[in-house]
Amino acid sequence: MTEGATTSTRVRPVVVLLAVLALALNLRAALSAYPPLLETIRADLGLSAAFAGLVQAATILMMGAGSFAAPALARRTGRERAAAIGVTAIALGTLTHGLPAAVPLVVGSLAIGLGIGVVGVAITGVIRDHLPERAGTATGLYTVAMMGGATVASLTALPLADVLGGWWWALAAWTVPAVLALVVWWPATRRLHDLPGAAPVRLPWRNRFARLAVLFQAMSSVQFYGWLTWLAPFYEAQGFSTTRAAVALSVWNVVQIPAALLVPLAAERRRSWAPWAAFCVVCAGIGVAGILVAPVLPVVGPWPWIVLASVAVGAGFPLGLAVVAWRTPDGATAASVSALTLGSAYLLAALAPPAMGVLIDLAGFRAALVVILAASLVQGLAVVRLGPRRVTYDGDT
């Protein structure tokens, strides 16, 4: 067992893992239920496209704010209670969506974003302290649960709106799994305690390992939100029908799930983070380069490029979490570094899609995709600096 990770609690690791997964199911669901209902919401409330888009962007920005605030909250309440507060904010935000008006839509979205940011950072510290030998597996399963919740939310948004009688009910319905997650989380983790050796709450801006972890995670998020926003429109511009472009995006989403589980699991076997992180970078670079040069290949179509781009972002996020868990000395430090990496990643992720949109207006889709190509190159630089030299939080300040 990792030094400092002794079990000072009677809670079994599998119970902690199940509680983590219950929270993870809620960390993208409310975000993913919004886009399928976007045009209906705009028509019903009379919102401009710019305003409707800013609602989602503001949510991601609040995820960054919640990430930055999480260590201070955890210092006052403990990480387990901080996570409970975060999922409570998600529940209240989704409940607020049940009021069919523009102000509750915005307020609810901001509360959801804040809660997601807090929970994500708190969970990283819990995994580091109480699941240290299975951090790669835990972060992989955590990411799969997060993606699974997002997939279910996006697929059920329109049917729920029809069955429940309005888009607001379809959004508010996600209050139920958030409340259930809190019901699971609190009894399972209330006997957990932060382990000794807590790091200062101050975010580690000057720590070299933390800065490199920021680069890796932020560039992964730029790729994720860039593709999420513009992959389908890009292929529509190549002559795909709306339906076929939606299929391309669905394939990109689905492939991320096994990638998020299998790649971190493979990396964990020998703690071989750098080779698998480099694998993600290579997939990202080949995927975006292929789409730039030959977006639709003869016979096989766009699918090789889309699969490679999906593997890169699907495995990249949990690997970014895993390297923090593996190379920090305790849960408090892991949470502090995670706050910096996730907060920075969300802020950049919120800016990437509109920046790419400006480039599309000025010079076309290929100019915008250079943003993703550049992100993969910067991510590769982070892997080179983090990998062979085994830079850790302890050994490099």
Image (cartoon, grey):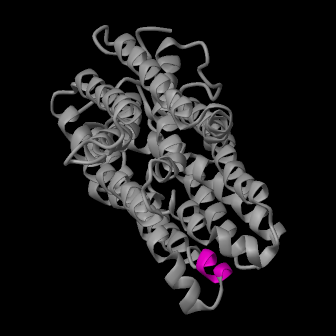
For residue 237, say whether it is visible. Answer: yes
**106 or 325: which is nearer to us?**
106
Q: Nearer the viewer, residue 296 or 98?
A: 296
**x and y percent of residue 72 in the render?**
67, 37
User: In front here: 393 or 60?
Assistant: 60
Specify whether residue 334 is painted magenta.
Answer: no
Q: Position of residue 46 (x, y in %)?
A: 82, 72
Residue shown at 61%/72% (left/top)?
37
- Kindly identify the residue that appears in the image at 59 percent across and 38 percent down: 349
Q: Specify whether 47 is left or right of 336.
A: right
Residue plotted at (61% across, 43% down): 74
Residue 58 relative to residue 20: left or right: right
The spot of residue 76 in percent (x, y) is 66, 43
Residue 85 sits above or below residue 234 on the image: below
Along the viewing direction, whichever of 142 and 294 lies nearer the viewer = 294
Magenta stretch holds residue 170: yes
Q: Quadrant of residue 8?
A: top left
Q: Main secondary structure of the magenta part?
A: helix
Per the rendered image, the range of residues in magenta is 167-172
